[in-house]
Amino acid sequence: MAKAKNTSLPTDAVVAKFDMLYPMINSALDEMREFSKKKQDGVLNPLKVKVINRLLDDIKEVLSADPSTEYLDLLDDESLPQNSDAVLILGQFRAAMDQFSKKYYGHHDGVGYSRRWSTVEKP
């Protein structure tokens, strides 16, 4: 009897996108923290909001099956958020990504010490 695939696991494609986006969210968060240190109430320009929201949209897509996504909001492109608002939102997205990673990346049985993603293709 064939073993049923665990559809609650992410796919290899989702994991590949996660791995691409994770350093990008870290970079964006680091940059916004620096801006916030210099001028906490400084307002983001429309280009920064657009670039950050594009990143956040892709992250929401990767995390779409995770319940945390209902608490993840994009930056408001009409009222243009302050630097500190962007830091808060980026931090929430990174926390959700960290939670996702802890849930699906870890130790696996096999030869020696092995850490890898658990995916639909490789449960």
Image: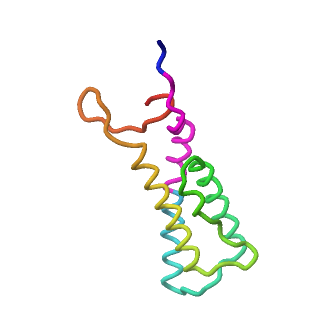
Report the side of 101 relative to 82 (left or right).
Answer: left
Compared to 115, does 81 lie above or below? below
Tell me what residue is drawn at x 59 percent, y 54 percent: 59
| Residue extending furthest toward the top | 1
- Residue 67 coordinates in the image, percent (x, y): 54, 53
Prevailing secondary structure of the magenta residues: helix
In front of the other: 22 or 14: 14
In front of the other: 108 or 4: 4
Q: Quadrant of residue 76?
A: bottom right
- Residue 15 coordinates in the image, percent (x, y): 51, 41
Compared to 50, does 60 lie above or below? above
Report the side of 113 relative to 84 (left or right).
Answer: left
| Residue extending furthest toward the right | 78
Please report the bounds of the magenta region as a residue range: 4-23
**Picture quarter with the C terminus:** top left
Tell me what residue is drawn at x 67 percent, y 59 percent: 54
Compared to 88, does 66 lie above or below? above
Compared to 21, does 48 lie above or below? below
| Residue extending furthest toward the left | 112
- Residue 33 coordinates in the image, percent (x, y): 49, 75
- Residue 65 coordinates in the image, percent (x, y): 57, 46
| Residue extending furthest toward the front | 1
Q: How many marks?
A: 0
Colouring of the image = rainbow
Tell me what residue is drawn at x 69 percent, y 77 percent: 45
Tell me what residue is drawn at x 65 percent, y 56 percent: 57
Q: Was residue 71 drawn as part of the magenta stretch in this picture? A: no
